[in-house]
Amino acid sequence: MRLSRAQQRSVSKNFIEAELMRSPSNNIEWFIMLHKRTGKSYMLLNDDDSIIVSDDIERLLSIIKNLGFRQMTVNI
């Protein structure tokens, strides 16, 4: 799901969880997964359809908080 689309919607009401996960291709980087009540999961993408990946966890936490989530899971 694109970040711009997620920001337009009430994501925290449609999704039950935000999860911060390590990138399988690079142990230093992290990405965000959003989980729906229906069981579907989505990676958070930029507007150019690339996965938002960062080694700065604070940046990713800020994105999650700005989407309206008050809790999240970290999967190491």
Image (cartoon, rainbow, N blue to C red):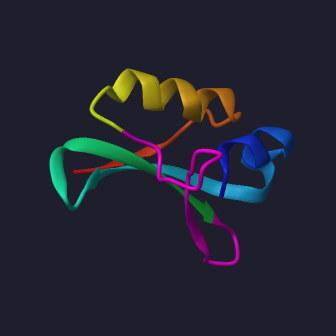
**Is residue 52 located in the magenta-colored stretch of the structure?**
yes
Q: Quadrant of the N terminus?
A: bottom right
**Is residue 16 located in the magenta-colored stretch of the structure?**
no
47 or 54, which is in the foreground? 47
- Side of 19 where 65 appears, left or right: right
Q: Residue 15's spot in the image, x, y percent?
A: 69, 57
Q: Residue 57's spot in the image, x, y percent?
A: 34, 29
Q: Residue 56's spot in the image, x, y percent?
A: 32, 26
- The quadrant holding residue 37 is bottom right
Residue drawn at 53 percent across, 23 percent down? 62
Q: Residue 65's spot in the image, x, y percent?
A: 60, 28
Please determine whether, in this image, residue 8 is positioned above or below residue 14.
Answer: above
24 or 19, which is in the foreground? 24
- Type of secondary structure dominating the magenta stretch: loop
Q: How many marks?
A: 0
Residue drawn at 58 percent across, 45 percent down? 46
- Side of 18 where 30 appears, left or right: left
Residue drawn at 64 percent across, 37 percent down? 69
Please determine whether, in this image, residue 12 is positioned above or below residue 24.
Answer: above
User: Which segment is the magenta one?
Assistant: 36-53
Q: Residue furthest left?
A: 27
Residue drawn at 77 percent across, 38 percent down? 7
Q: Residue furthest front?
A: 48
